[in-house]
Image (cartoon, rainbow, N blue to C red):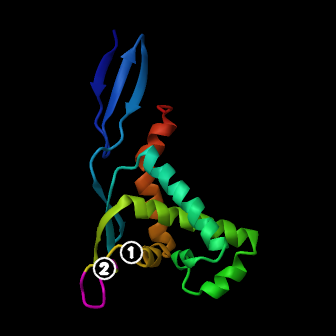
Amino acid sequence: MGTVENIGGSGFDRAAFCYGGMVMIKLSLPREQYWIDLHPMVRVKVRPCTTPLVEAARSMAARVMGDIINGSDDLLMVEHDVADLQKKLLDPDWCTGVRQFVYVQCLAKAAILEWDGDGVKTDAGEIGKITTENLRDVLLHSDIKDVFMREFTKPLMQVVAEGNV
């Protein structure tokens, strides 16, 4: 019979399973909501990153992207200047960039439960609502978008990297 040794963790449980002289690492994903610091002025409370949540965001992004290409109101998810965006979408590289941004925004929309910090306050000094337009405006800062993607998907990617899927 194998033995189990708890080896600590960084936001999620790790256990080393020793069996027949071999050690396998098994990670379990966070089960509770947690905060991610995106920027000194923005932090978000998120649901755990799970495969169903990621797949739902992919499905939503595909639908939204189709709507954007067809000229629907979802254009505001991406840019303030809707007329200019329609022209840019004719460029395949620009279209790919928009598609990736739409995916990040859909993932954030599915994951973020609340946010805090001076970067998400209204002119009146209150925390702004999490709306499509407000998410867009926060995620248009590429450093914030990159931190969100890296930190939110980190637990899932670590499980994949260790071959436990």
Left-right relation of 68 to 23:
right
Depth check, mark 2 against mark 1: the one in front is 1
Please report the residue visible at 56 percent of the width from the left and 81 percent of the height from the top. 79
Q: Residue 151's spot in the image, x, y percent?
A: 41, 56
| Residue 26 in which image quadrant | top left
Left-right relation of 66 to 1:
right
**What SS does tag 1 mark?**
loop
| Residue 125 in which image quadrant | bottom left
Please report the residue visible at 66 percent of the width from the left and 86 percent of the height from the top. 84
Queried whether the magenta region covers residue 86, the answer comes back as no
Queried whether the magenta region covers residue 123, the answer comes back as yes
| Residue 158 in which image quadrant | top left
Q: Which residue is mark 1?
A: 131
CA gap between label 2 and label 1 equals 8 Å
Q: Which residues are magenta?
A: 120-126
Left-right relation of 125 to 164:
left
Please report the residue visible at 43 percent of the width from the left and 50 percent of the height from the top. 53
Q: Main secondary structure of the magenta part?
A: loop
Q: Residue 152's spot in the image, x, y percent?
A: 41, 55
Q: Which residue is mark 2?
A: 128
* 28 to 137, vertically: above or below: above
- Marks 2/1 in contact by CB < 8 Å: the verdict is yes
Which quadrant of the figure contains the N terminus?
top left
**What SS does tag 2 mark?**
loop
| Residue in the foreground of this view, choosing between 164 and 82 | 82
Name the amino acid, label 1. Answer: Thr
Left-right relation of 33 to 93:
left
Name the amino acid, label 2. Answer: Gly
| Residue in the foreground of this view, choosing between 138 and 161 | 138
For the residue carrying disc 2, how many other residues have a C-alpha within 10 Å: few (<14), some (14-19), or many (20+)? some
Q: Residue 2's spot in the image, x, y percent?
A: 34, 13
